[in-house]
Image (tube, grey):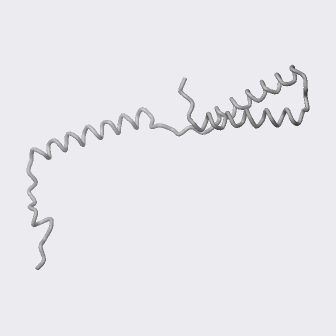
């Protein structure tokens, strides 16, 4: 199971705290059973909110493999370019104007 993100922890915790306080104030319960039921409901609601927070998507296997293949290909091209001198000269790239 993946670890929860900071946003999931923050939203879930805030939901549990706010919903517990709100339900306790609205129900005006004073029994232990009522507090336990409200607490369980708040925890369930907090878990629901934490699980439905959008998670940033990572690249899929295919995209990651393509990116890895592209970086390996560019590394191979860079190694070949290092062995073959560039036919252009510095003056051709940067003309000097007097």
Q: Residue at x 57, y 30 (%)?
A: 4
State the quadrant of the C terminus: bottom left
Farthest bottom residue in view: 98
Q: Residue at x 9, y 47 (%)?
A: 84
Q: Which percent across, then down, holds residue 31?
A: 90, 22
The number of numbered discs placed on residues in the rendered structure image is 0
Q: Which percent across, then down, holds residue 80?
A: 14, 43
Farthest top residue in view: 33
Q: In the displayed structure, would residue 5 be above or below residue 31?
A: below
Q: Residue at x 24, y 43 (%)?
A: 74
Q: Quadrant of residue 40?
A: top right
Q: Quadrant of residue 54?
A: top right
Q: Quadrant of residue 90?
A: bottom left
Is 72 situated left or right of 83 in this image?
right
State the quadrant of the N terminus: top right
Q: Which percent across, then down, holds residue 22?
A: 82, 37
Nearest to the observer: residue 64 or residue 52: 52
Q: Residue at x 13, y 71 (%)?
A: 95
Is 1 situated left or right of 60 in this image?
right
Nearest to the observer: residue 86 or residue 37: 37
């Amino acid at each position: 199971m993946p670890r929860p993100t900071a946003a999931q922890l923050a939203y879930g915790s805030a939901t549990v705290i706010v919903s517990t306080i709100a339900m306790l104030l609205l129900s005006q319960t004073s029994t232990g059973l009522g507090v336990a039921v409200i607490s369980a409901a708040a925890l369930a609601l907090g878990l629901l909110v934490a699980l439905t927070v959008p998670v940033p998507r990572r690249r899929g296997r295919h995209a990651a493999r393509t990116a890895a293949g592209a970086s390996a290909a560019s590394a191979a091209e860079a190694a070949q370019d290092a062995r073959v001198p560039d036919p252009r000269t510095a003056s051709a790239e940067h003309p000097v104007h007097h």
